[in-house]
Amino acid sequence: MKESTRLLKKYKLDQEWFREEIRSGYAVESWRKKLWLVELDLAMELKRVCRAHGLGFFLVGGSMIGAVRHQGFIPWDDDMDIAMFRADYEILLAHPEWFEAPYFLQTPDTDKGYFYSYAKLRNSRTTACTPSFAYQPMNHGMMIDIFPLDPWVPEEGLPLYEKVMELNRDNSSYMRRSNPHMTEAEQKRAEAWSGRDPYENYQEIQRLARSFEGRETDFISHAVITVDAYHSNYFPKEDVAERIEVPFEGFRLPIPKGYHDFLTREYGDYMQLPPLEKRDSGHQEFIFDPDKPYATLLPNP
């Protein structure tokens, strides 16, 4: 049975859920709807596990914007970002057995070829990967990203952020080396690897992110990721002190009660739609297939 069909049955939905439609002037195709359902199922599986064990999580980034502005995904989006306070995150990572196949909690400890600085929850019956890492021996199922949140002192944190960025780039360079069909630009990225053990880099990133642990701080940060400018990498702790559940594509998922201040600080007028020419996910190079397992679709490393 195809995974998308299994999930329709699991949630008592019909094929109409996958119907193509126009949202906010953007054509949402059937394949994207299938992708969304896989990610929603991953989020609901995380919600089930967190509720069973007294852990908290909430949507962040574009997923939080989608929840507030669209009551679901941003129509041109294709991923889901989730945050957890460090204590809850560490408990979750200590128990990958809480997830049963096809669900897989991916960290450098559960997947020896994976060297991202944060966890992913994957569905192993599906495929989602960037060609740069297609040959890296790791789970490439469709996923949701799970970021830890740590206490932060903005005026002291910039050197730490820059060091984490350096280590993230180094691990990215390492993972690219498995690709035998690199472009010239990719080759340069791969050659930039320092030679350091990527697992040691990962551990150092976690240590740096926890630099302010035990201190009373007014801010928290998803310090292990460095794709945003530094000033967007931290936010007031009070914004996420409480959570509320909101509708999300017919399901219900948590966001911070202080979502307005959180989103305004990071995005400005987050209710304003971007111009038509900028309505894309930025993941056009990804290989997505919600119905084929990555093990049958991707090349063997």
Image (cartoon, rainbow, N blue to C red):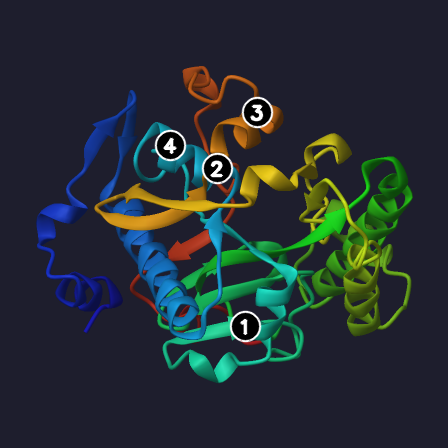
Classify mark 2: residues with Cα within 10 Å, few (<14), some (14-19) or many (20+). Answer: many
Q: Position of residue 260 (x, y in %)?
A: 49, 27
Q: Could you give the CA–CA distance between mark 2 and mark 4, rounded to whole angstroms? A: 10 Å
Above or below — where is 234 with respect to 111? above
Q: Quadrant of the N terminus?
A: bottom left
* 23 horizontally vs 122: left or right: left
Name the amino acid type tagged 2. Answer: Gly
Q: Secondary structure at mark 2?
A: helix
Q: On the image, numbered disc 4 is attached to which residue? A: 68
Q: Could you give the CA–CA distance between mark 1 and mark 4, rounded to whole angstroms? A: 27 Å
Label disc, if present, on residue 267 of the rendered structure: 3
Please name the residue shown 48% across and 37% down the image. 62
Q: Could you give the CA–CA distance between mark 3 and mark 4, rounded to whole angstroms? A: 13 Å
The reply to whether discs 2 and 3 touch (Cβ–Cβ < 8 Å) is no
Q: Position of residue 24 (x, y in %)?
A: 29, 22
Indicate which disc, 1 or 4, sits on the residue closer to the N terminus. 4
| For discs 1 and 3, the disc positioned in front in the rendered view | 1
